[in-house]
Image (spheres, grey):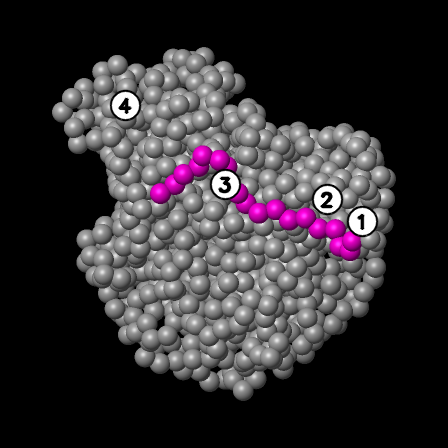
Amino acid sequence: MQAFEYAHPRSMTEALPLLGSRWGETEILAGGTDLLSLMKNYVVTPKRVVNIKGLRELRGIRGTPEGIYIGALVTLEELRTSQPMHEYPALAQAAAGVTSPQIRNMGTVGGDLCQRPRCWYFRSGFGLLARDESGRSLVPQGENRYHAILGNDGPAYFVNPSSLAPALIALGAKARLDGQNGERYVALAEFFVIPKSDAERENVLQPNEILTHVIIPEGAWELSSATYEVRQKEALDWPLATAAVALKMQAGKVASARIVLGHVAPIPWPAPEAEKSLAGQPINEATAARAGEAAVQGAKPLSGNRYKVQLARVAVKRALLAAARPRSIGAKGGV
Amino acid sequence: MPDRVNKAEITCTVNGETLSLKAYPMARLLDVLRQELRLTGTKEGCGEGECGACSVWIDGEIANSCLVPVLQVAGSEIKTIEGIATGEQLHAVQEAFISCGGAQCGICTPGMVMAAVNLLERTPHPSETEIRMGLAGNLCRCTGYMKIFEAVVRACQATGVKA
Amino acid sequence: MKKHLIGRPVPRKEGRAKVTGQARYVDDLVFPGMLYGATVRSRVPRGRIKGISFGEGIPWHEFTIVTAKDIPGENYVALIAHDQPYLADGAVNHSEEPVVLLAHPEKYLLEEARRAVQLEIEALRPTFTIEDSLNKKEIIWGEDNLFKSYSVEKGNVDEVWARADFIVEGEYRTGAQEQLYIETNGMIAVAIPEKGVTVWGSMQCPYYVHKALMALFGLPADKVRVIQSETGGGFGGKEEYPSMIAGHAALLAWKSGKPVKIIYDRAEDMAATTKRHPSRTRHRTAVSKDGKLLGMEIDFVIDGGAYTTLSPVVLSRGTIHAPGPYFCPNVRIRSRAVATNAPPHGAFRGFGAPQSIFALERHLNRVARAIGLTPEEFRRRNFIQPGQTTATGQVIRENVNMNHLLERALVLSDYHAKTARFARENSGQRRKKGMGFASFMHGAGFTGSGEQYLASVVELEATPQGRVRVLAASTEIGQGTNTIFSQIAADALGLDYDSIEILKPDTASVPNSGPTVASRTCMVVGKLVEAAALGLQQTLVGSGYLPEGYTPAGFERACKRYIESHGPLKSSSQYQPPPGIHWDDATYYGDAYGTYAWAVYVAEVTVDTVTFEIEVNDFVAVQEVGKVIHPVLAAGQIEGGVAQAIGYALYENVVWNEGRMFNSQMTNYIMPTAVDVPPIRVFFEELPYSYGPAGAKGLGELPMDGAAPAIVNAIENATGVSIHHIPVMPESLMEALAVTEKAVERA
């Protein structure tokens, strides 16, 4: 990998001035599970790497009147095992879906949300949008079996790789972004964006900001939630499709629902039609199947990923059925 | 150019010994262990955190040393495969790997042993599922894992495993 | 004197070194003043090299740079043909083909430099598929794109079609597969023009590397020395390509005058080195109404990639195994290895047989269905029996009983009860369960006259302390060479396990016992160890120093006295074919192998017909392998091979992008983990083979052959859909299940 300058600030005050004003100059290092591979393969070539592992204020999970604050440095293993998270099965299940103990110990919440796409073209140096010399994307006619089936009108066809984002969005979480001019809060649903050029990123974070916390709003513990992942292989692989759901139930009927798909679109993909289809309904095979159907209504599969439409539909159905069952935690939420 | 980058100095503990190291910022913990400290028991299989051959413990937690810039472990306690046996006395997991056929080509073995010992320190009597999940971050291409599972079971039956 | 070690699970010879991390692999070795080497490769699959330029910002004067013009001897990797260059000179024929070598003391700078070398290559139209190669769309190799073809004829196939009650046809395909040893390839070379070349590295076949370096440098045998370091898995992947890397390291060392280490990183290893040959097999089968095979016509094609390498012998094994363990009076096999502009495909456990056996064992299920028999009943009626002949006219002399193996496997897997239960319970379920099996055999040792050409030699040497050293070029690559050789030698001599030492393979000190491939190490080389041990004993007995019924202490005294009066105490043994073995290379007729291992494997699977997830829930492997020398190592071989074959069947998909492996990382080429493998239950039948050590046969490759078709047969049993290619990816299962995106999940 290319040489870089290494900074290890001890506080946010020290850290923020170290960040660059343009993407590409500086990269933030936390767990390292994604960044080191990207650097090794020259996909990113920062001049400075800022290790934020020393920032104590980014650690820990704590309850506040507004909700649960999860520090960006909380590891996936902490998320999976910590007591407060048992109130949010969708999130604990999503963390458990990262099956390697090593990666769960190293990988952080902030890193999971900010990790770069797994798109083979991107990882092989074709750029975020995988375009050829004439500016056309190589994906629609190329190797696209793991690419987007939703939100794929272009120019981006990769899928968002985050394990936690669908669950966090379903739970209504927001992100706290800190910059030199102070902090701002962004609903996680608004955090991810579809880039329009290779120079843009997959989220609204500015190059000189740090994602410091994720906040699950007070009251979310009342929701019945679950995450369901469809995989080819049980460990050391990313899911092919994920659905996270969070339901507010009243007298056995859905008062409100949030449904978010993962690994099917360049951003975690909300499914408002599916949510609407559940209003006032109980969760059963029929209503869950209908919601799954509604979730993929707009899907436009590419040449090689038609199967993912089916997987996404099923993931929604199974996540709903799991959420409606008594709480349990495991790689597949006991499904 | 790399040689224009200054080496930084860090202090950490490796297998119980406190060391002061000079390393390039881009050096991975794996490289420093293998090249500077000549602790070559820790292996590189993929360099991407997929195979677990480079597994070490950092402050008691199993981690892939190929993904850790060495400067990040300043002040940490590192344990490698070289620190698992007590002198000539092998750890029960190592004994069991030999007697059950858990090691074939041996290249995944140090990482696998680090993961297995770590698992048993947390869960002294794991179920089969817990064994599988505990080793899910370590790939082995020789054994099909059966003999490794047997070794873990035998190691927890043996005396001398810390509970 | 007692024999007590064979058949017992003695501790692995180098086990302690491996579990403590003390075993030294090539990347663990460091030489003073050592440089690191890197390879600049073509990104173009086929073209003419127009220029090489060295970009700015790199202190090129600090680098050692080697191109084809620096080669002192012949620019080819000596193996079967002489078509593969060490460094492309003028033309490139596959992407990842080596063009320029670089060396520098600083690894990080080396990678910067590698990226700064630009190859200007004028692209020519490449060929990527078996069909395009066969159709000669472009001639990319020789006159017809064919590395090799064979034809096997038995009886008269042409006349069976008219009298057949059923004729069943099918086409089957298998993909490339990466060996994925966890230790990547690597070599260290020291080369001094006046002194010669020495290399240390990860390898299966020291004398292959030795032969290749002699040609590359134009040096005599005694000026080239090859030493195996501890080797972290091979599976065939370190049979041929180490010759390439050793040559590259040695060329850089030759030019720089310094030791040079080349260690491939994972992506380079996966993309550039050999993988299993992709294949296409077509079957046309004639069957009588009572379920007897009348005729088989088999067309077997493998994609060899850009150069010949080992394709002719891979093709040979695949061809001979194509009709399986069945008797058929009329057989025609036509087989071809074709050229494409992919990196050369090569040796991988099974060596052609997993491809043709996948096709056969899928096809026979189709035949059984067509004639209305169960898969097991159809096979029962056709298993080859002692006294019958194979397609190459080999008379089966052993007491083979495939029916018994089948029965045992079906009982152990509870096949009948489970198939009946699953058939009842699957209806209306989205998760469907199924059982499938495959019956097969694997020839041990080199094909045909191969072992006679090799004429392998093993030596034993005794010390005055009564210790015995085994000198052989057969490598320990995890499969247990050191351990079983010690058991065999110790038992032959009546000594303790610890009295035997295995010398590290080093061409300066061990004789050529042949390559460590083809399930030959135990059966062929082990037999030589046994014979040399008996020779040593005879020498001592003949000299009068060794009394009958001696003890280890008596052996030690005898060695001491012998060496004092006669000098070194050595014994050597050279391969002799078993009596009555005949093979004709010209007609491809005769005894293809000295013997075979026989097996029936049963898989139980669950298929989620909605998410296309496939789990293997149970696996039973029953095999007859002759005497089992070491039950734990033997079972370990079977379990590991089955796990690799599960990957072959379900996960391991090499995706090609313009002739390059697109998913050349462990993050996107996925193999089975601890969470993915089922219980693998291994059972041995032992019919001692007269010409193996203590009756042992070869077994290392066997498990690779049968697991994939057993799994795909089980998928068919569960779902009713027939899949003709592996790996079975979710999207191909979806197509097979004909699930449209409109389909609604059923409870």
Q: Which type of secondary structure does the marked residue at label 3 adopt?
A: loop
Q: Are marks 3 and 4 in contact (CB under 8 Å)?
A: no
According to the image, label 3 marks what residue? C577
Whether labels 3 and 4 belong to a single chain: the reply is yes
Which quadrant would the N terminus of chain A be assigned to in this image? bottom right
Mark 3 or mark 4, whichever is nearer to me: 3
Mark 1 burial class by Cα count in 10 Å: few <14, some 14-19, many 20+: many
Mark 4 or mark 2, whichever is nearer to me: 2
Q: As displayed, is residue C205 above or below residue C618? A: below
Q: Position of residue B138 (x, y in %)?
A: 60, 45
What is the spatial separation of the Cα atoms under label 2 and label 3, in whole angstroms?
A: 24 Å
What's the magenta region?
Answer: C566-584
Q: Which type of secondary structure does the marked residue at label 2 adopt?
A: helix
Whether labels 2 and 3 belong to a single chain: the reply is yes
According to the image, label 1 marks what residue? C562
Q: Position of residue C414 (x, y in %)?
A: 49, 16
Chain of the residue under label 1? C
What is the spatial separation of the Cα atoms under label 4 and label 2, in whole angstroms?
A: 54 Å
